[in-house]
Every structure is written in structure tokens, then in C-alpha cells.
Image: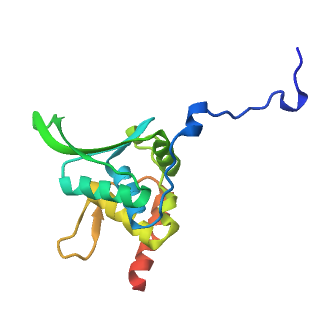
Amino acid sequence: MWRPLHIVGRQIEWTRARSLCRERYTPKLGHAFGYVVGAMCADGTVANRYISLVVNEEHFAQAFADALYEAFTIDAHLESVTRPSGFLNSDLPGFHVRVVSSYLADLFRQCVGGDAHHMHQQFPFVVLNSLETFEGFIDGYVEGDGFRKKNGAGRMVVSAYPNNPAARKAIKPQAKWRNAR
């Protein structure tokens, strides 16, 4: 059997043929892009062919859909859903935003990586591109897993990558930016 010697024992990269003709969304970096990434890191789901956000507050779902349109020109719609609550033993109302796009799902996996179901996400360093993008990321993340202080003097993040030293380093410059204003 003939074998070219220059590729024996090497790995060959391949691509699924259908993935070459899918619609590509070029992100527009800025506050909206950061908001989408932050919201997805806090409460989102990235599957093989879609991304999804299920939340309790309608304003959060609408802000996410608006940010998707501004950052990716994707027209996402809200759906009213109910989901079971084990704590309350009843169904709770919520809102669902879902975008079916394997390209967008791949893009989010590249940004965040890891496995969200096992809390092994990486810090999305792409949000450090600009102060505006980083502030959008914090706004989206706080909307999902945090709260704004009542006196307006800051935001509290409830679950911000506590065991990831790279994330702690990345978030530290925010204090410098805040003091520079």
C-alpha cells in the first residue's frame, strides 16, 4: 500500500463539509458584546447547535436579545416558559431566548471553553479587549449572578470564578479603571 512519507504518523485536521456553508456572525466588540458574553457565562447554555438563556426576569431576557442584535445582528425573540422548582415544588414562570446557530455556539465555546455543567469555564479574556467591552461583561454577569448595590456605588458578583487565579488577575485592573475616572 502506498503511503506518503511526510504524513505518516501525523494528525490530519478535517472539517465537516456542512460547517463550511453555515452563516457566520461577526461580532461587533463593545458593551453589547460584553453583555452577551457576561450573561451567557452567568446563566447561559451552549449546546452543539444553539445558545440559550433562561431567566426569571423579562427585562434581563429582553436586554440580552437587544444586545445579541447589536453585537451580532441576530434577531432573537423572547418566549414565556415555565420550569420546575424543586425548592418550591411548583412551576415558576420565566423567559427563554434561544438562537439556533452552530457557528455562534462554536464561537462561545472558543471564548469561554470548558464545561459549564461542571463549573470548569475559563475566564473569557476576549472581554478585556476594551474597557467598554469589559464593563458590558460585568453588567451582563451581574444581571445573572449578582446585584447592584442600593446606593449605586458598585456591583456585587456572587459567583465570579472563585478558584481561577487567571480570572482574579484579569478582574483586578477594573479597580484601576474605576479610580482613573
Locate residue 66, reporting x and y percent: 31, 58
Q: Which residue is drawn at 67% across and 33% down?
A: 14
Name the residue: 45% across, 44% down. Answer: 120
Indicate left or right for 22 with 32 as reference: right
Can you see residue 80?
A: yes
- Position in image of residue 124 (x %, y %): 48, 56
* Quarter containing the C terminus: bottom left
Residue 160 visible (yes or no): no
Place of residue 100 in the rendered image (x, y in percent of width and height, measured from the top left): 39, 39
Q: In which quarter of the image is residue 51?
A: top left
The residue sitting at 46% across, 46% down in the picture is 104
Work out which residue is located at the far bottom of the displayed protein and give it.
Answer: 181
In the rendering, at what x and y percent does residue 170 appear?
Answer: 48, 65
Q: Residue at x 44, y 36 (%)?
A: 49
Does 141 sit above or below residue 8? below
Q: In this view, does 180 lie to the left or right of 147?
A: right
Against 148, is 111 above or below?
above
